Amino acid sequence: MMKLRLMAICQILLFLALSHPSLAKNDWLIQPAKESAKADIHSKSNEIVLKNGLIQRTFKTSPNFATVDFYNNRTGVSLLRGVKPEAAIQIGGEHYEIGGLKGQPDYGYLDPAWLTDMTSNPDAFQFTGCRVESPQARYEWKPKRPSSHLPWPPKGATLIADFTPPEKLKDKYAGLTVSLYYEMYDGIPTMSKWAVIKNESDREIVIDALDVEILAVTEQEKTHLYADDDYKRSVAGESGASVSTVSWGPDLEYTSQIDYLYQMPLLLTCRYPLGPGAHLAPGETFESFRVIETVFDSDDLERQGLAVRRTMRTLAPQVTENPILMHVRNSDPETVRNAIDQCAETGFEMVIMTFWSGFNIESEDPQYIASIKALVDYAHSKDIELGGYTLMCASRDAGEKYNCIDPKTDKPGSRFGQSACLASEWADGYFQRVLHFIDATGLDVIETDGPYHGDVCASTLHKHHKSLEDSQWTQWKACCNFYFECRKRGVYVNTPDWYYLNGSNKCAMGYRETNFSLPRWRQILLARQNIFDGTYLKTPSMGWMFVPLVEYHGGGAAATMEPLSEHLQEFEWHLAQNFGTGVQACYRGPRLYDTDETKAVVKKWVDFYKRHREILDSDIIHVRRADGKTIDCMMGVNPHLEGKGLAMVFNPTNRKVETTLELPLYYTGLEDTASISEKDDIGKTYKLDRDYTVQIPVTLGPKGITWFVIR
C-alpha cells in the first residue's frame, strides 16, 4: 500500500510540474539537473547504485553481479519485473550467460525479498570485481564551427564490472575476461552499456554471438524505455534502421503473463544481428557496440523527442555544428570560384562539390590535387569552407575480387545491387587515397554517399574478415575508424546513414528524393512536413533538406528553381522554411542567385538565420503540421536565451487566413507572461494559461510567411 501511495504521489508531482510554475523550475528539460552521476558502492549489502537524480540502476554483487532495479526518479516507477543475465556470449559453439541470478519465482514482478534466496548460475561467467571511472571520449572533437557549448567527453560516471569464465571453463578459456561498462551521464535520464572482451590466453578465441543487454521490462514501462545503439544504420533518412541490435521479444520465463503462448514482447535484448564472429588472437581486445538507454517520464511525444535530442547533443556534440552549405553542381574551377564568391556575398559558409559534379576525391594526380588545393585556399581567403562528395561502397563495383558476396547466391551482389566490401583490401586503398587527398588539399568537409549500411559478405578471401559471420561487424568498424580520422582533422561529415555516435555531423532529415521532381509548390509543402516529422528525433542541425536549383531525378522545368529570378517566390519559400527552422539544405545548382533581386532574397533569409541562430539551432516544438488547408507552424525554444522562442508561421493557401494560433510555451521556461512580437514589431504581453499556452491572433495573406519572437 505504501508503494502504491508513493507512486501516486510521484505521478501527481509530475503533473503539477507541468501545470505549476514553481515546480516547473525543477524540470530537467528547462533547468539543469542539480545532481551529478555517481556510483554508490555499499559493501555491507553487496549493492551498487549508479544514479544521477533522474534515473538509477541498482546492482547486486553477490552471489553474482545482476541488475535488480532500474528506477525512474521522475515518475517513481521501476522499469523492471525480473532479474536476467547481464549479458550473454557464445564461444566455441556454446552459449554462456554473464552474471545474473536464478530462482525468481515469478517474472510478473520482482519482490526485493526474493533476492536473498536467489542463486548464481554455476555455468555463467562470474563477477570478480568492479571499478568506477570517468567517461572517455570515443573520438576527437574540438568545436571548429558555431556549436553548442557542451563538454566533451560528456560528464558522468562509468561503472566497470569484470567477469571470468565459470569453473568448468577455467582450463579451456583461462585468461579470458569480459568487462561490462555502464555509463551514466549528468543531466539526462540516459545511460550507455557495452562489453569489452580481452583474450589473455594462449589460443585464439572466436566470439560467435554476443548479447550486450538483457532486461525484463514491465508492460507499463516498455514505452518509457527508449533503446538505441551506435551500430544501427538507416538508409537515406528512413525512420527505420536497416540494421539494429535492439529487439523486443518474448520472455518464456514470464509464465504468469496474460498471453496464452507467452509471446508478449517485454524482453529487451541488444545483440549483434549477425555474429560478430570476431577472431581474438592472444593479447587482442574486442569492444562491442554501445546500447543507449533513455528513460522517458511521460507519454507525450514532444517530451520524449526532447529527451532523445538532449541525449544526442550530449553524446555526439559535433552534431550541433550547423554550417550554411551549398551543393555546387560542377567542380570546374570557374564554377566553384563563382559559387564561393556568391556564398561569401550572401553569407553562406560552406561549398560542397556535389555528386555528378566531376569532383574526384580519390585522385592521386598531383596536378589535380594542386588544383583543388588552390580552390580550398581561395575559399579560405573568403572565409568559406570547401569539400566534396565521395561514393564509398554502396552501389559501387570495386571488382569481383573486392565486392560483397551475396550468401544466397555466392556471387557478387547486395541490397543495392552491388557494394564494395569495406573489409577487403580495396577499402585500405580507398581510405588511404581519401585521407591523403584531404591532408594534401586541406578540404574542410566530406560527403560520403553509401557508407557502410549493413551489407554482409560471404567471401572467405577478403583481408579483414574471415567469413560471413564477421563481415558485418568488420565493415562497420572500418567505416567508424574512417570517421574517427575525419574527426581528428576537424572535417565536417555529411553521411546518409546514422553514424552520429561515431563522429558524423549530419544525415538526411528524411525525405523521398523523387519528391523534389514534383511541381515546386508540392515539393515545398512536402518538405515542410519532412522537417516537422524529422525533428522529433533529430535536432535541426542533425538533418539536411534539399532544394533542386537544377533538375534532380526528373520533373523538368516545373520542378526546378532555375531560372531563379523567374521562380523567386517558390525559392524564397524554400529559404524561409529551411532557415526559419534551423535546417540547412543542399542548395544544388551552379549558383545561388542570378539577379540582384534574387541575391537580396537569399541574403535576407541568411541574415535572418544568423540574427536568430541560437534559437533556431535549439529544439523545435511542433505546433501544427502542414496540410495545405490553413496555416502551419514550428517553433524553436530555448529557456536559456533572452529570446526564448521563435515561431515560424506559413500560409500555403491562395487565400487570406485570419485565425487564432495556440502556442505551447512550457519549454521556453516562461511562467506567467510572455512578450510576443511579430517580426520586428513592438512586443505585446500575453498571460500564459494554466497549461502554459497563449492564444495569438494571426493574419496572413495568400502564400504569406511571418514569425513571432517570444521573450
Image (tube, rainbow, N blue to C red):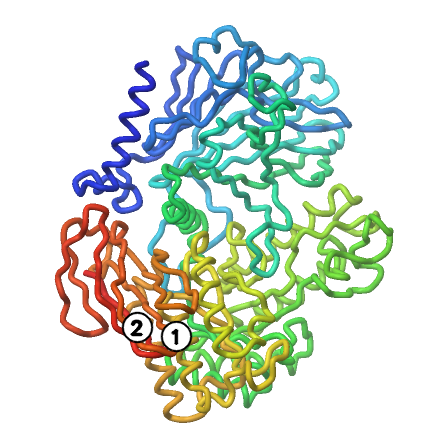
Which of the 4 quarters of the picture holds residue 72?
A: top left
- Residue drawn at x 62%, y 65% is 449
- Residue drawn at x 59%, y 24% is 259
Image position of 553 with respect to 213: above or below: below
Q: CA distance from mark 2 to mark 1?
A: 8 Å
- Residue drawn at x 76%, y 29% is 203
Which of the 4 quarters of the picture holds residue 127?
A: top right
Give 701 or 175, whichever is nearer the viewer: 701
- Residue drawn at x 69%, y 78% is 365
* Residue at the spot of label 1: 653
How far across and how far down the image is residue 62, in percent? 50, 13
Q: Amino acid at mark 1?
A: Thr
Quadrant of the image containing the C terminus: bottom left
Give 271 or 647, whichever is nearer the viewer: 647
Picture disc at residue 657:
2
Q: Amino acid at mark 2?
A: Val
Image position of 436 with respect to 107: above or below: below
Picture disc at residue 428:
none
Q: Residue furthest right?
A: 410
